[in-house]
Amino acid sequence: MKLLNHTLSYLAVMLLVVIGAWATIFYVNMLDEIQDSIDDGLENSKLLIIDKVKEDTILLHKTDFMESNYAIHAITEETARNYHEAYLDSTLYMQNEEDNEPVRILKTAFRATNGKYYELQIVSSMVEEDDLIEDLFFAILWLYVALLASVLIINNLLLRRIWKPFYHALDNLERFKPGSQESFTPVSSNVNEFSSLNKTIASLLQRTTETFNSQKQFIENAAHELQTPLAISINKLELLTEKNTLTEDQLHEIGAVINNLERLTRLNKTLLLLSRIENRQFPEVHSIDFNALVNRLVTLFTDLAEFKSVKITVIDKGTLSGNMNAELAEILVSNLLKNAITHNYPGGFVEVTVDGTGLSVANSSGSAALDATQVFKRFYKNSPEKNSSGLGLAIVKSIADYYQLSVGYTHNGRHQFTIRFPEA
Amino acid sequence: MKILVIEDEPDMREVIIDSLEKEKFLVESAAGYHAAMDKVAAYDYDCILLDIMLPDGSGLSLLEEFKKLKKRDSVIIISAKNAVDDKVKGLNLGADDYLAKPFHLAELTARVKSVIRRKTAEGQMMLELNNITVDTGNRVVYVAGQELALNRKEFDILAYFMANKNRLINKTALAEHIWGDGTDQADDFEFIYSQIKNLRKKLKDADAAVEIQAVYGIGYKLAGR
């Protein structure tokens, strides 16, 4: 949810509460005021009627409301003495509405000039409460909608313009990648918060870039420092083996040393590759045709597979392409292939399936199911293969993480590793 | 054939020089930026091996200087970095090849011979030993004047052996040269044996006066018979 709409949702709830409370108070007060003024009118009518009765005693026999708004009944003195004047809410049949309508009644007692006691009832028509509530409800609903609409419009026109530097900074941050040439361009704003936000981001990114560069420098230097002594050792031993004075046993021993130095070299290269992937030092991205890549690498591995008597089949179920660094895409696929060929038995198979959303490599193997939570960890080894570095699948995992691909392992009589591209 | 080795590490320099001298090259060396500049300005070389990280200047700027001097010497960059951008930069600046440390001496020899062959006049692309001639330009092998049919890998292996004739070739070096870097984690290079076996048989059937000797635990050696 966007920030602007987020505030609007809080505002909507708040407005509903405030306007609702206001409407209730307003309604109660208004009703009270109306009743007050009706009661005043009834009081006034009472005085007028009693005065009129003094002059015209015929009126004392008007026992029904009929066309006027009062009625008079004779009562005993006893009743009159205990009489309490009262205002009542009641209903009365109205000719025009053809229904019982709410009325206000004033009941009082008085002594006429003839010395007898009478009860006087005066009515006045009242507000129809349900109609009033309905009218008020709709008025308030329209007010509420109008308020929200105007807030929405103000948000979109005014606030959007005010928040522009913020969205610009956000957009810039999303596109920022340490090591790439694109730098952060702050937008000038006369709002203090925004200009300080921009400044903070700029300095943070600069520090990140510096750290990234120094780390990259360190990795490269470390590589240099290790590779050169390794190169000298291997090459000196190679020259030594060419001396004709050595016995076969000595040659064999030197061969073993060279093999181990080569393993050390590969380990060094692989660890460097892992840290370069994790430092995201592969910025160049191309659209990779995975069908072609798989077929090319399978051809490359034919000799190794034939030596191991493993049969490789490729099943193209659909075309798969994705944006990746070409070097990493090749390492990803070849590590999976190599893994499947190496951890196999003579006469076994490797089956590569490519479809529109991903690729999977399945292989036969003498070993039981691997621990799916451990299999992608560095230096995880579950085979007697003495030369296995235990890093091949760790590299697969870190390349997959780099490009937000999902990578999974399942065992169903055969080992299967699956790479899935995220849904577009 | 004159070769200049620009490398600051004394042991590395020495081992490269020893190896190249076995191939009857005339080898000179420079330990740093300025020494290299002096030598290149004064003499012409058939091939220059250039370490990119020198203590007193960058190998890449040295490469730019060579260009300004309008030198046509072949240059092979040797680097411990193996960073793709360095490789691209170097090749764009006119280097002929790029070799990452650590490398095998057999690979260095093959690369040096290859860039020199590319620079020399057409028709000089031949590698010869006894009655075998390998034409690397047209990718054809002749045994006593008769063409010998080889598949792509067999040809690559023989050409590699011919470039390193009478030298002991490490089997890892051979595997990486023929099958590429992708195999470098297979760790087990015994699979190249079947290719060698086929090649041996073809050479023997054609009466080639060479043999591929196996040195147990290390690799192979092509020698005349």
Image: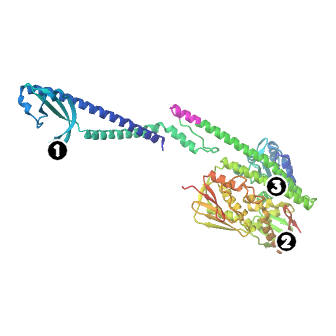
The amino acid pointed to by label 3 is Asn
The amino acid pointed to by label 1 is Glu
Question: What kind of colouring is applied to the model shown?
Answer: rainbow
Q: Label 1: chain?
A: A
Kindly report the distance in space between the C-alpha atoms of the residues bearing marks 1 and 2. Answer: 128 Å
Could you tell me what secondary structure mostly forms the magenta stretch?
A: helix
Q: Please identify the quarter of the rendering in which residue B122 is found.
A: bottom right
* A165, A306: nearer the viewer: A306
Kindly report the distance in space between the C-alpha atoms of the residues bearing marks 3 and 2. Answer: 36 Å
Is any part of residue B135 visible from this angle? no
Q: Earlier in the sequence, mark 3 or mark 1?
A: 1
In the image, what residue occupies the spot 51% across and 34% down? A189
Highlighted magenta segment, given as a residue range? A188-200
In the image, what residue occupies the spot 79% across and 52% down? A264
Picture quarter with the C terminus of chain A: bottom right
Local packing at callout 2 (Cα closer than 10 Å; few below 14, some 14-19, many 20+) is many
Which structural element holds mark 1? loop
Q: Which residue is mark 1?
A: A98
Q: Which residue is mark 2?
A: B208
